[in-house]
Image (cartoon, rainbow, N blue to C red):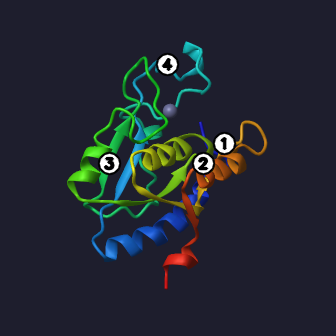
């Protein structure tokens, strides 16, 4: 499964990552980590073709992404019978963020209308100041306009949309 033009988020994400890495700020990467035959797959009546299967190339973090060596990888949706779009769902992300005293999150990646949307909404709900990286997200757009609607919803619910030019100076 591929997000159309999903690779285009790598370059802008790397620019944000450079800003964070230079300041040794915490970096987290969430990823789908599905067992074979996961409930979200079409073979089980789910909406998606098989994707991000544990220990296969499909679950690998993009080789082009410049994650710092100290970045923490958060696996999600690893239970065979439960899906999770949000990086917070059944993970240690919230715990780790609190442990580090993080209060503001900058969120980008894939896909705008699914995992980014749910992670952002959970982040707001959990009380983090939530910054959405508008130039470092791409959506699936199963229905035309889904991504646009997702961004509107996230902003309406309290996310602050920015682009690189807002932070690089
Ligand atoms: Zn998935």
Secondary element type, mark 4: loop
- Under circle 1, the secondary element is loop
Residue 93 is labelled as: none
For the residues bearing labels 2 and 1, Cβ distance under 8 angstroms = yes
Q: CA distance from mark 2 to mark 1?
A: 7 Å
- Label 2, residues with CA under 10 Å away: few <14, some 14-19, many ≥20: many
Farthest left residue? 99
Residue displayed at 38% across by 32% down: 54
Q: Which residue is mark 1?
A: 140
Number of marks: 4
Earlier-in-chain disc, 3 versus 4: 4
- Say left or right for 152 vs 84: right
Question: Residue at (53%, 47%) from the top-left corner?
Answer: 116
**Up-down relation of residue 29 to residue 64 (above or below):** above
C-alpha separation, residue under disc 3 versus residue under disc 4:
22 Å
Q: Which mark lies nearer to you, 4 or 2?
A: 2
Q: How far across and how far down the image is residue 161, in percent?
A: 58, 63
User: Which numbered disc covers residue 73?
Assistant: 3
Q: Residue under circle 4?
A: 39
Judge from the rendering whether residue 25 lies leftward or rightward of residue 17; answer left or right.
Answer: left
Q: Are marks 1 and 3 in contact (CB under 8 Å)?
A: no
Secondary structure at badge 3 equals strand
Mark-to-mark CA distance, 1 and 3: 23 Å
Dot in front, 2 or 1 = 2
Residue occupied by mark 2: 112
């Amino acid at each position: 499964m591929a997000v159309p033009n999903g690779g285009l988020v790598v370059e802008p994400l790397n620019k944000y990552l450079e800003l964070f890495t230079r300041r040794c700020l915490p970096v987290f990467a969430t990823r789908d980590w599905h067992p074979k035959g996961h409930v979200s797959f079409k073979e089980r009546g789910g909406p998606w073709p098989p994707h991000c299967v544990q220990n296969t190339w499909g679950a690998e973090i993009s080789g082009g992404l410049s994650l710092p060596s100290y970045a923490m990888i958060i696996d999600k949706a690893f239970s065979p019978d439960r899906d999770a779009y949000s990086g917070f769902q059944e993970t240690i992300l919230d715990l780790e963020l609190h442990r580090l005293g993080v209060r503001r999150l900058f969120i980008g990646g894939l896909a705008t209308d699914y995992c980014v949307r749910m992670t952002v909404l959970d982040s707001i709900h959990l009380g983090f100041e939530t910054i959405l990286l508008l130039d470092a997200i791409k959506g699936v757009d199963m229905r035309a306009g889904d991504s646009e609607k997702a961004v509107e919803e996230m902003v309406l619910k309290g996310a602050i949309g920015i682009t690189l030019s807002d932070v690089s100076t």
